[in-house]
Amino acid sequence: MTDQRRRLILPGQYGPDFDDGGPLLVVEAREFFTARPMHRAKAHLWLSALRHRVQALRDAGEGDRVEHVQVETLKEALVGRSDLEVVDPPSRTLRAQVRHWGKGTEVLPSRGFVTDEDEFAEWAAQGTGRFRMEAFYERVRKREGWLMHSDKPVGGKFSLDDQNRESPPKGATTLGLPEPWWPEEDEVDEEVRRDLDRWEHDELARFVGADDRRRFAVTPEEAHHALDDFVRTRLNDFGPFEDATLTNDWTMAHSLLSVPMNLGVLDPRDAIEAALVAHRDDDAPLSSVEGFVRQIAGWRDYVWHLYWWFGDDYGASENALDAHERLPRWWQELDASDIDAACLRTAIEGLHDHGWLHHIQRLMVLGNFALQRGYDPVHLTEWFTDVFVDGTDWVMPANIIGMSQHADGGMVATKPYASGGRYIDRMSDHCGGCRYDPTKRVGEDACPFTAGYWAFLARTEPALRHNNRMARPLQQMRKLSDLDEVIAQEARRGTP
């Protein structure tokens, strides 16, 4: 063992897939948690995963092969070491630090995804520079044979998204599903919470949001419990209600598996295989299984590869819609106390309490609101990375800069994901008890999303007028007799 290189373990590499059985160096650098204000629950999860990995090796009698170092910066753990190897880290910052400070460190190909970077680069190089997830996803499905009959997709189409857009059941306050399986905290979590309390008290770190209890898997065993529970109790309903939102049901039928996958403790292939087995056994409908497979083998892999393919500058300065507004205090601090808009209040409250929201709340509530208000997309991307428990450097740029804010001018999405309040009314139960009316754009009860949509189009028309998919809404906007009034109203609007 003494002649072997020691495997450097960094954030996102806390599972056995990143351990080939040799000596390990698990680095706990406080800078991982203190660079910017982070959600307290996120800090807890990521630190808990790290320490649980170390504890699991010790419990298994393998403590002699793990070196756990607690340092202020990664540099302290790298400088002077010539015996290291590392699976290429999942962020540009970490890769740069390893290459700069860890001179002589052997870098192995990245892991934790369905496809590798060379494969994506080969596919991308054949295109025109405008990438579409659908084409990438079809390629992966064909290669793996997932949900395929020979070279044809089961069900006749690769995407069954049109079957997965049902509104929430009328009159329902929840989907009526069993509560998800939750992990039990242990002495490692108690130690983590004490240390985070101390960091805050000593002003070594600043956190936002709550950390009432750990609700996400941080070990491989927990991740497989969570996966089994999802497949057994929620996968059936995941598809049809994938885009629906209910005020009193924060999990809906979602898997809650993004955290363990991004921590590196759940292999995405295991999650996909579990869903495929459920379909083969007639325990889950095709539309739900296909939607789940597309989230992982399609979108998750896709944004990972775009992060590297677009290069170091992507996400640093893109601002195609000229958005420069600062994020307001209530937004940054997850303070919903003065928010009247029910959909936005529910999202901010849920984010404060859990550090997690499902994709429609992220895209069509928070992202839509930020897009309409012209929040700075680079700062917004940092905020999403910091306050979501599954936020990573690689996952957010394409999701926020590209898809949500259209700040890259269309490299990821063909049009901005902007909508008025009627979409939210159709897909949620928020609007019925809200003081705002989703059908109104002017007046005291004008919906900030409906009015904000038209104000957004007026502001961004110069940048969007050549986008064919925006031709009709821009034409409708020009015909509004009260457009000037809407613009002035939204310019005055404070916290919605």
Image: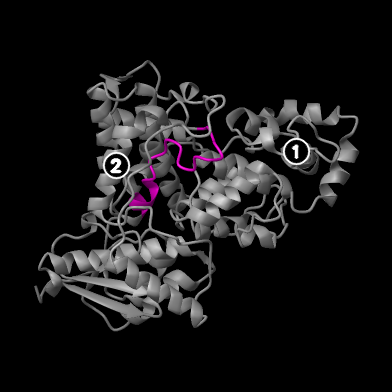
The residue that label 2 is drawn on is: 227
Confirm or deny contact between disc 2 and disc 1 (CB under 8 A).
no
Q: Residue at x 10, y 68 (%)?
A: 61
Judged from the image, the secondary structure of the residue bearing numbered disc 1 is loop
Residue 408 in view (yes/no): no
Looking at the rendering, the stretch of residues picked out in magenta corresponds to: 243-262
Question: In this rendering, would 468 be left or right of 352?
Answer: right
Q: In the rendered image of this protein, does residue 429 appear above or below residue 303?
A: above
- Badge 2: residue crowd in 10 Å (few <14, some 14–19, many ≥20): many
**Quadrant that contains the N terminus:** bottom left
Residue 222 place in picture, x, y as percent: 26, 51
Residue 405 place in picture, x, y as percent: 62, 46
- Residue pushed farthest top? 156
Q: Quadrant of residue 32?
A: bottom left
Q: Main secondary structure of the magenta part?
A: loop
Label whose residue precedes the other's in the sequence (2 or 1): 2
97 or 265, which is in the foreground? 265
Q: Residue at x 81, y 50 (%)?
A: 493
Question: In this rendering, would 104 be left or right of 345?
Answer: left
The residue that label 1 is drawn on is: 436
Label ID, residue 444: none
